[in-house]
């Protein structure tokens, strides 16, 4: 008979040992999510009042709101220690900025420029999350990381 091992939770680093780069990356992701939610909600209300219910424009505002919610949900999962979501959130921030940049330039829209600025805040969080000290924390396996001084003492 084939033995099937019990399902184990993925290893998680100790949340108490977060470096400041990890904390700031998470703060920037959350701030970007809140800004996108606010801009999306403001856009929905402003466009519904001024243009009526033109669903093309309201759909863009609704997508901005959904992006903000996605940033918050993925950031919260990452903050609680489910580190496998870091790459998904980082990829999402890169894709959103890469899509908004040509749209902002092409349509020459001040509103999209503000949304792009809010998305760039999340991109800065992604950059911080992959800095060496933060990357090392994300890759730790339940506290068996080498002490921080060990990397300085290691021969080059």
Image: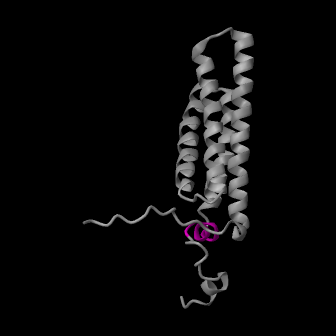
List x then y, in percent, for residue 116.
65, 37
- Classify residue 7 by image quadrant: bottom left
Name which residue lies at 56% across and 40% down: 96
Specify the color scheme. one colour
Residue at the far left in the pictured view = 1
Viewport quadrant of the N terminus: bottom left
Name which residue lies at 43% across and 64% down: 6
How many numbered marks appear? 0
List x then y, in percent, for residue 5.
38, 66
Segment colored magenta: 132-139
In the image, 80 versus 3, the foreground residue is 3
Name which residue lies at 57% across and 16% down: 56
List x then y, in percent, for residue 107.
59, 25
Residue at the far front in the pictured view = 1
Eyeballing the image, is 78 above or below 2?
above
- Classify residue 136 by image quadrant: bottom right
Eyeballing the image, is 103 above or below 90?
above
Q: Name the magenta segment's main secondary structure.
A: helix
List x then y, in percent, for residue 27.
73, 53
Name which residue lies at 66% across and 50% down: 76
Residue 22 forms part of the magenta stretch: no
- Classify residue 138 by image quadrant: bottom right
In the image, 54 versus 81, the foreground residue is 81
Eyeballing the image, is 110 above or below 86?
above
In the image, 114 versus 25, the foreground residue is 25
Eyeballing the image, is 40 above or below 153?
above
Residue 137 forms part of the magenta stretch: yes
């Amino acid at each position: 008979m084939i033995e099937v091992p019990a399902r184990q939770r993925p290893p998680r680093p100790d949340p108490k040992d977060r470096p400041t780069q990890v904390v700031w990356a998470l703060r920037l992701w959350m701030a970007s999510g809140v800004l996108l939610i606010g801009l999306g909600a403001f856009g929905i209300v402003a466009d519904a009042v001024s243009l009526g219910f033109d669903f093309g424009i309201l759909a863009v505002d609704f997508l901005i709101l959904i992006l903000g919610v996605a940033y918050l949900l993925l950031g919260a999962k990452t903050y609680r220690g489910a580190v496998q979501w870091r790459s998904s959130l980082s990829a999402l921030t890169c894709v959103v900025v890469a899509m908004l940049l040509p749209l902002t330039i092409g349509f020459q829209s001040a509103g999209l420029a503000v949304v792009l600025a809010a998305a760039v805040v999340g991109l800065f969080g992604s950059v911080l999350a992959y800095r060496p000290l933060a990357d090392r924390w994300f890759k730790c396996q339940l506290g068996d990381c080498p002490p921080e001084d060990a990397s300085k003492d290691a021969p080059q």
